[in-house]
């Protein structure tokens, strides 16, 4: 009897990388003239909340709606091209070194690497290639006449992640009981419960208590570090890229508060 394969499923944001993949292209989109100033402030404000760990389920859903409105009307092929060309240099310095090593350990053990993210596939697929993932499961945004409508065909979030994993397991003949899953978020409980070897990453106190009660592994990733890439600019951009989210978050919070004082909102 042929032994079924196992896989290692990884959440992306704040599990494999230390920031939001969805907002990693902000500076590039501004330079391209695609994003307006007001939209940038709204996006970075969301990033600030994410960096401070306050993006719960309702806030994440609100962020998905905001991002849907932002990209409505964009040329889908142009965004995919920008993601392929620019995302590696933005994301590589944010990859947790411990996560990169863990991926290599799973590969050495013969397990497929699958990234499971609520971010859109245009962003997740290039990051998956950078990290050496075998498969990616991501949100699919609706495209009509080559442009985004602002609606999601499939929002890969919460229980939907577990459903996507189960469907992939059927197609690829993965043994989920022998598989692993990693996430930092309590909203990914369905994803963690779908496998035989769940682990929580840099958990909050409530998630750490839950993991302890269920006998799940807890791992800590502390060191974002550039991974290997053909793009030689990554290493030089590392230090600046690591500081960018924090600097932009402070600027955004100041600007929004100032705007509210003037408008009375």
Image (spheres, helix red, strand yellow):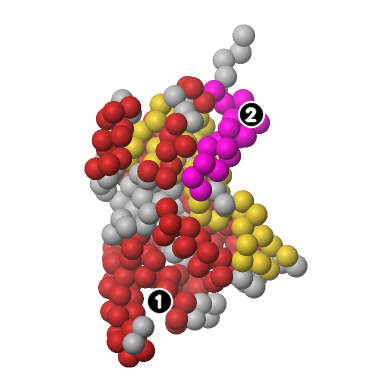
Residue placed under numbered mark 1 in the picture: 41
Q: Mark 2 packing: few (<14 Cα in 10 Å), some, or many (20+)?
A: few
Q: Is residue 68 magenta?
A: no
Residue placed under numbered mark 2 in the picture: 170
- Please state the horizontal and vertical placement of residue 86, each as a whole percent of the image: 49, 64
Q: Mark 1 packing: few (<14 Cα in 10 Å), some, or many (20+)?
A: some
Q: Work out whether 257 lies above or below 133.
A: below
- Please state the horizontal and vertical placement of residue 112, each as a whole percent of the image: 52, 32
Residue sitting at x 31%, y 70%: 249
Q: Work out whether 255 lies above or below 76.
A: below
Task: Classify mark 1: helix, strand or loop.
Answer: helix
Comparing 74 with 230, the one in front is: 74
The quarter of the displayed image where residue 217 is located: top left
Residue sitting at x 48%, y 58%: 61
Can you see residue 48?
yes
Residue projecting furthest to the right: 145
Q: Which residues are magenta?
A: 157-175
Question: Label 1 to label 2, Cα distance in Å?
Answer: 42 Å
Can you see residue 91?
no
- Please state the horizontal and vertical placement of residue 21, each as a whole percent of the image: 44, 57
């Amino acid at each position: 009897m042929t032994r079924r394969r196992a896989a290692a499923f990884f959440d992306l944001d704040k599990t494999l990388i230390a920031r939001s993949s969805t907002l990693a292209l902000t500076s590039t989109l501004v330079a391209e003239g695609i994003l307006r100033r007001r939209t940038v402030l709204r996006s970075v404000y969301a990033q600030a909340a994410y960096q401070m760990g306050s993006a719960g389920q309702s806030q994440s859903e609100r962020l998905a709606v905001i991002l849907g409105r932002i990209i409505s009307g964009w040329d889908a092929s142009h965004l995919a091209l920008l993601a392929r060309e620019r995302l590696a240099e933005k994301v590589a310095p944010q990859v947790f070194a411990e996560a990169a090593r863990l991926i290599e350990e799973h590969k050495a053990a013969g397990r497929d690497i699958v990234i499971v993210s609520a971010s859109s596939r245009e962003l997740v697929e290039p990051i998956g290639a950078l990290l050496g993932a075998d498969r990616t499961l991501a949100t699919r945004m609706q495209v009509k006449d080559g442009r985004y409508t602002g609606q999601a065909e499939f929002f890969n979030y919460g229980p939907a992640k577990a459903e996507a994993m189960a469907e992939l397991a059927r197609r690829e003949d993965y043994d989920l009981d022998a598989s692993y899953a990693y996430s930092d978020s309590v909203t990914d409980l369905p994803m963690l419960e779908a496998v035989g070897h769940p682990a929580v990453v840099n958990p909050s106190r409530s998630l750490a208590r839950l993991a302890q009660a269920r006998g799940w592994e807890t791992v800590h990733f502390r060191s974002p570090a550039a991974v290997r890439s053909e793009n030689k600019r990554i290493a030089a951009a590392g230090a600046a890229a690591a500081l960018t989210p924090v600097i932009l978050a402070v600027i955004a919070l100041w600007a929004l508060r100032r705007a509210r004082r003037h408008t009375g909102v």
